[in-house]
Image (tube, grey):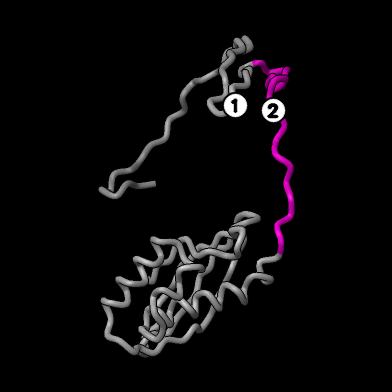
C-alpha cells in the first residue's frame, strides 16, 4: 500500500489487552426527565425504575381528508397575492404574519399575474396541524411553496407561508 506522496505505508501491530476487571458502575440523571440511569455494570440493565411512562402513540387522521380545504386556502392566498382579491378576505383563514407576507408579495410583483396550483402534497405532523408543499406556476415560472395550517375552533388557519 502506498500513500499519496508515493511512500510505502507500513502497518504495525500494537499490543493491547483490555483489563479483565469489570467496569465500576456509574450513575447519572437524565437531563429531560430526571430519571437515574446506571452505566458500566456488565451484567445488569440500566435502572429505569423511576422513568415515566412514554406518551401513548395514536394514529393521526388521514392527510388526504384535508387536502381539498388546504388547496382552496392556498388558491385564495394566491388570488390575494395576484391582486385579484382584497387582502381583507384572508382575515379569517390566515394569521397576521401571513397577511403581512401576502401584502409584501403583492406589492413586490406586478398586478394581475396569473398563477396556477400545479401540485400539492400535505402531511399531518400533529393531530391539529397540516404542512403543505406545493408547486405553483407564476407567469410561466414554477415556484415552490411551503405552508403550515393549524386547526382552530373556527376551522383551518394558515400560520406560515413562504414562496421559494
Residue 90 placement: quadrant: bottom left
**Main SS type for the magenta part?**
loop
Report which residue position mark 1 lands on: 33
Above-or-below relation of 27 to 142: above
**Do labels 2 and 1 touch, CB within 8 Å?**
yes
Above-or-below relation of 4 to 71: above
Toward the viewer: 66 or 59?
A: 66
Magenta region:
41-61
Toward the viewer: 155 or 161?
A: 155
Badge 2, how many Cα within 10 Å: few under 14, some, many 20+? few
Q: Let me know if residue 30 is in the magenta part.
A: no
Q: Let me know if residue 58 is in the magenta part.
A: yes
Above-or-below relation of 148 to 43: below
Report which residue position mark 2 lands on: 52
Cα separation between marks 2 and 1 = 8 Å
Q: Residue at x 29, y 50 (%)?
A: 4
Amino acid at each position: 500500500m502506498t500513500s499519496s506522496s508515493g511512500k510505502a505505508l507500513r502497518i504495525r501491530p500494537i499490543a493491547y489487552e483490555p483489563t479483565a476487571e469489570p467496569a465500576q458502575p456509574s450513575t447519572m440523571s437524565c437531563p429531560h426527565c430526571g430519571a437515574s440511569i446506571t452505566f458500566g455494570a456488565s451484567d445488569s440493565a440500566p435502572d429505569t425504575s423511576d422513568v415515566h411512562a412514554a406518551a401513548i402513540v395514536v394514529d393521526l387522521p388521514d392527510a388526504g381528508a384535508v387536502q381539498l380545504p388546504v388547496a382552496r386556502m392556498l388558491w385564495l392566498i394566491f388570488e390575494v397575492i395576484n391582486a385579484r382579491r382584497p387582502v381583507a378576505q384572508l382575515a379569517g383563514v390566515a394569521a397576521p404574519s401571513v397577511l403581512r407576507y401576502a401584502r409584501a408579495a403583492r406589492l413586490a410583483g406586478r398586478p394581475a399575474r396569473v398563477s396556477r396550483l400545479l401540485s400539492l402534497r400535505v402531511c399531518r405532523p400533529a393531530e391539529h396541524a397540516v404542512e403543505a408543499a406545493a408547486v405553483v406556476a407564476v407567469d410561466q415560472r414554477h415556484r415552490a411553496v411551503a405552508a403550515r395550517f393549524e386547526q382552530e375552533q373556527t376551522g383551518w388557519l394558515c400560520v406560515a407561508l413562504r414562496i421559494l
